[in-house]
Image: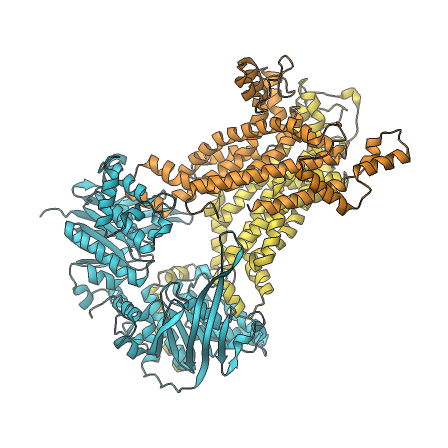
Amino acid sequence: MAKPFLQIKNLAVDFATRRGVVHAVDDININLNKGEVIAIVGESGSGKSVTAYSILNLLGNNGKIAKGSITFDGMNLENPSASLLKDIRGREIAMIFQNPMSTLNPIRKVGDQLSDMLRQHAQATNQTAPRKVIELLHKVEIQDTRRVTNAYPFELSGGMCQRVMIALALACNSRLLIADEPTTGLDVTTQKSIMDLIMGLVKHRNLAVILITHDLGMAYQYCDKFVVMEKGQVVEACDDHSLFTSPQHSYTKKLLAATPGISSKVEHLTPTVPVELSKPAVEIEKKELLKVEGLVKTYILKSQGGFKSQGNTFNAVDGVNFTIYQGECVGLVGESGCGKSTTSRLIARLEQPSEGRILFLGEDIGQVSDRDFIRSPRRKDIQMVFQDPTGSLNPRHSAFQLISEPILRLQKDFNKANLKDQVYQLAEKVGLPLELIYRLPHQLSGGQKARVGIARAIALNPKLLILDEPTSALDVSVQAIVLQLLEHLRREHNLSYLFVSHDLNVVRMLSQRILVMQSGKIVESGETAEVMSKPKHLFTKTLLAAIPQLAS
Amino acid sequence: MLAVPSLIGVIVVAFVLTRSLPGDPAVYFAGITADEESIAQIREQLGLDKSIFHQFIVYCKNLTQGNLGVSLNTGQSVASELSARFPASLELTLTGLALALMAAIPLGILAAVNPNTWIDHLCRIFVTAGASTPIFFSGLLLVFVFYYLLGWAPSPIGRLDFFYLSPPKVTGFYTIDAMINGDFETAAAAAKQLILPAITLAIFALAPIARMTRSAMLTAMGSEYVKAATANGIDRRKIIFVYALRNAMLPLLTIMGLVFSYLLGANVLVEKVFSWPGIGSFAVDALVASDFAAVQGFILVMAVMFVVLNLVIDILYTLVDPRVSIDG
Amino acid sequence: MGDLLLNKKVVRNTDTKLDPELSQHSQNSATPEQHDWRQQTWYILSQNPISMFSIVLFLIFILVGITGPFWVPFDPIASDTSIALQAPSFLHLFGTDHLGRDVFSRVVVATRLDLWIALSAVSISALVGTSLGCLAGYFGGWYDRIIGRIADTILAFPLFVLAMGIVAVLGNSLTNVIYATALINIPFFIRVARAEVTIQRNHQYVQAALLSGNTHLRTLVFHIFPNCLPALMVQMSLNMGWAILNAAGLSFIGLGVRPPVAEWGIMVAEGANYIISGEWWLVLFPGLILMLAVFCFNLLGDALRDLVDPQKRT
C-alpha cells in the first residue's frame, strides 16, 4: 500500500520549562492523503496546535520532537535541515493562524508583505511582483486591491486581514495547508465567509488540509476525517462523519454533548442529565425586578491632540429599554462593540449613565453616583460574574479570601465565627471542592476559577446577577458545566439573570427572553422560542445562520 | 508639541531655582571694595530691587529677544558664552551617542537572537558593568591606561592640543570644521582628543540602548507576525532585520530622548575629567559662584535641546510607524 | 440538605474527569503554593549563576556596611604624611593616599555612608513617586495630567545637572544630597507605578473588588497596589544603583560630602590628581568598589525581575 501524503507516526514533543520537561504530546498518529481535509479537534492544552506546529518545526527554542517521525511526500520532517525547511515552509506547506490582526507585520504594507513572500519563493521578480500581488488578492475575493496593497494591517478589518493571510498562504501553490483556528477572534458573521473562502480555494486546488479547531460544529461542516485529542493524546480518530453519530471514546461523547447545537437544551450538555435539572423549571411570575428606561451612555471621543473637543461624542448605549422579572433570565446578544458590555456595567453601577432611568424594584438607582453606590443597601442586590475567570480573581488572594470579600465589606450583621461556615457553604453550593479553598487562582483550573467567581457573586444572596460573557473564555466541556450550574442556581434560589454574550446559541439555552443589540440599540426582543424560530431583524437572522449545524 | 508645557515648566523652575541660589549677585558684581550705595545702585541696575514677579516678567521679555543676561563670572554675555561652548558639548555628546548606538544595537540583537545562551549572559554582564561604572572613574581609568601607560592618547586637556590652532568656525565641531578647511592634520588631532571622552560617554550609554534593543527584539521575535513569517518560509535574515528589527526600533526610539538627556548630565563629569571646554563645566563653575544668569542660560539651552530632540524623535517615529500620524 | 450534597457530587465528578489540572493538583497536596514557590526560585537561581552571584554580593555589602567600622585595620581619617602615597602592600592592602591614610580602611568604612545615602534617597523617592504614580494611574484625568507634567518637567532637565542645582540652592550638605538624589529618582517611580496600575486597573478583579463593596481608594491600596509591588521592587533595586552613582558623582565635583569624610566618590576625586603621575591605587580601589556596588544592585534588579516575570527581563 502506498504511503500516505502526510504521515505522522508515534510523534512525541517535549518542552523544556522552568518546572522541568513537559511532554506536550505523545504517541500521535495521523495519516492524510491529497485532497483530504482533516480536523484535529481538542480543547485548550490538548496539544492540537503543538502537533501541527511540529510539522513545520515551529516549536520554538525550548521544544523538540522527542520521538516518532513525520513524513511528507517522502521527505522526513522530524529533524529537518535548514535548507529543507527553507524549501518546505511556505512553499510546500502553508499555514493560516488565528488572530489575523497580529499575524501580519504591523508596520509593513500588505502589498510588500505579499511580495516578500512571492520573491522569497521565486514566484515573482521585482518587476512581476505587483501584478502577481493583485492576482493573489483577487483570488481571495478582495476587490479594491489598490487600497489593500497600500494599506497597513491596522487599516483593515479582521476579516480582511485574514483574507490577506490566506493570500499569503496560497501564494506558492503549496500542497498542504495547516489552518490553526482560522476564525477565532473574528465576529460570527465574518467567520462563515472566511471558512467558505478557504474551503472553496482548497477544493479547487485539491490541497490536503489540517484544520485545527476547538469547534466540533466547524469540524463537522468542513472536514472529511477527524482526530480528537485530549491531554496530548489522540483519544479517537475517525475517517467519516460517524464520529458524530456513534462516538466511541467517552471524551468524544462528552465533547459532543457539550457542544450546543441549534436545539440542544442546557440539561443535555452533559452525557447524563444532572439530578438537580431533571425536574422541569417552574413558571415565572411576572413580578418586575429591573426596569431600564431610555438608557444612554455617551463617551467623549478624544481628538488626536489629546484635548476634548466639542461635539465629538459617541453613544455606546443609545436609548435602551427593557425589563427583567424576578426569577427570570434575560439574554443580551450582540457582536463586539455593540454596547452590551457597557449596558451591563451601567446596570451593575460601575459606570454612570448619561441619560435614562434604572429602576430596581421601583427605585431609580441611576440617580446614585457610582462612587456612592458602594454604600447603598442595593449594592449587595446587584452582583456580577465576569468574562475572564483568571483576570477577575485577584492573583494574590486565595479562593477563601475571594469568596469572603463581599461578606466582609457589605454584610451588615457579619459574624467572624460564622465566616468560615458561610464560605464553605457557598463553595459547596457552586461545587468547589473544599480541599481547594485555600488555593490561589493560578493553582485552580478554568472551571474551578469560574466557580469561585460565581460563589463570590452569590455570596450576599443578590437579587440580580449580571453574567458578562461568563463562559466565553472557557472550553466547551467546562462551559457546559458552568451553564448547568448557573441554571440550577437560578431555579434553586429564584435568581434573576442578565446574560450578556456574543453567542446567541449559548444565551438561548438559559434565557426566557432575548434582547438583540446592535450599535447601541436593541434591534429585536422577545420570547426566546419566538426570536429563534421567527427572527424579524436582519441582524438576528445573520446571527442565527452563523450557528454551526451539528447533526445529532 | 507635547513638550511645550514641559518647556514652560522648565523656564519657571529655572527662574525659581536660580533666584534661590545663595549669595547676592549685586554684592558680587560691585566687588569687594564697594560701599552700600554702589551696591544698591547695581541692584537697581540689575532690576533686583523689583518684586520677584516683576523680575520674572522682565526675564521672560528678555528671553523673547534672545537676551540671557550677563555672566558674573566672565563678564561676557551669557548667550555668547553658551554659543561658544555649546558646540564642544554637542560634538562630544553626539560622538558618544553614535559610538554607543554602533556598539549597543548589534549587542542587543546578538543577545536577542540567542536568548539565555552564554552570548546573551556575556552581553548582559558587559553592558551592565558599563552602566555601573561611575563616569568619572571610567574616564580616569581610560586616561591612565591610554595616556599614562600606553601613551596612545594625547593629554586630557581640552579639545585640541596647544600646538594646533582651532579651525575657523563653521559648525563649531572642530573635527568637521578642520576638514572643511582642508586641514586634516588638525582634524586628526581634534579627533584624537575627542575619542577618549566620547568612549567614556558611550560606555555609560551602552546599557539602556542594548537592553532596550534586546527586549524589543525579543518581543518582536516572539510575536505572531514573526511566527507567521517563519511559517511562510521568509528568510531568517530578512525576518530579523526587516520584520523584527524595524518593529523593535519603535520602543528604542522612545527611550532615546532619555538616553540623550542622561548623556548631557554625564557630560558635566566627563568635561571635568578631560578639561573639556563645554557648557557642562561652564555650568558647574557658574553654580559654585551663584552666577544665576549663566545657570539659567544653561538650563534653558538644555531644555530647548530637549524639546528639539523630542521633536526629532516624534518625526522619526512617524517615519517608522505608520500607525502614528504626523498631525497627532 | 443531604439531597443537595448528593446532587453536588454528580456535578463535581464530571468536572474532575474533564479537568486535566485537577488530578495533577491533588497529587502534590502538601502546601502546593509554598512548594511551588521555593522550587521555582531555586530553579531560576540555579539556572542563572549571575543572579546567585548578585545576591551573595549584596549580602556581603550589607554585612560590610554594618560591621565595617568595627574591624578596619586603621583609622580612616588619621593622616600620617610620612607614609603618604605608598603602593599597595601587605600592610596597606590598597596602599595609602596623599595624606598617608589607609585606602582599604577608608573604602570599607565608606560602604555604610554610601549605602545609607542611596537607601534613604530611594526610600523617599519610592514613597513619593509610587503614591503619585498610583493616583495618576488609577484616577486618570486631571490627576494624571498634572502628575505626568511634573514628571516630564523633571525629566526635561539633565538629571545630574538638576541634582547639582538643588544641592547648590539648598546648601552644600549631606542631607541635601539625599533630597536631590531622591527628587531626580521620583519620575521613574511615577512612571513605573503609573504603568503598572494602568495595566492592573483593566483587570476585571478591580471591578469585582468594587462590586464587593470596596471604595476606590481601598481598591487601589489593598487590591491593585500589592499586585504592582514586584515591578516596584525591581525599580527600587535599579534606582539604588543610580542613587549611589549620583551621590558619588556629586561628591566628585565637590558637592555634598566633604573631606576628610571617607566616601567613594570623594576618594576618587582626591586620587584623580595623582593618576597622571601613576599613583593609580588612589582611584582604582574606591572606584572599583563603587562600581561593584552599583553593578550588584543592577544585577539584583535583573534577578528580581527574572523571579517576578521572566518575560519582561531586558
Apparent side of residue A1 relative to residue B128 in the rendered image (left or right):
left
Q: Which chain gets the cyan colouring?
A: A
In the picture, which quadrant includes the C terminus of chain A? Answer: bottom left
Chain C representation colour? yellow
x then y, percent, for residue A276: 35, 79
The part of the image, by quadrant, that contains residue A513 is bottom left
Apparent side of residue C233 relative to residue C261 in the rendered image (left or right):
left
**Res C72 seen here:** no
x then y, percent, for residue C81: 79, 22
Q: How is the image coloured?
A: by chain
Chain B representation colour? orange
Residues A24 and A359: in front is: A359
x then y, percent, for residue A174: 20, 44
**Res B1 seen here:** yes
Q: Residue at x 70, y 21 (%)?
A: C274
Residues A301 and A550: in front is: A301
Residues A525 and A239: in front is: A525
Residues A400 and C133: in front is: C133
Apparent side of residue B39 relative to residue B208 in the rendered image (left or right):
right
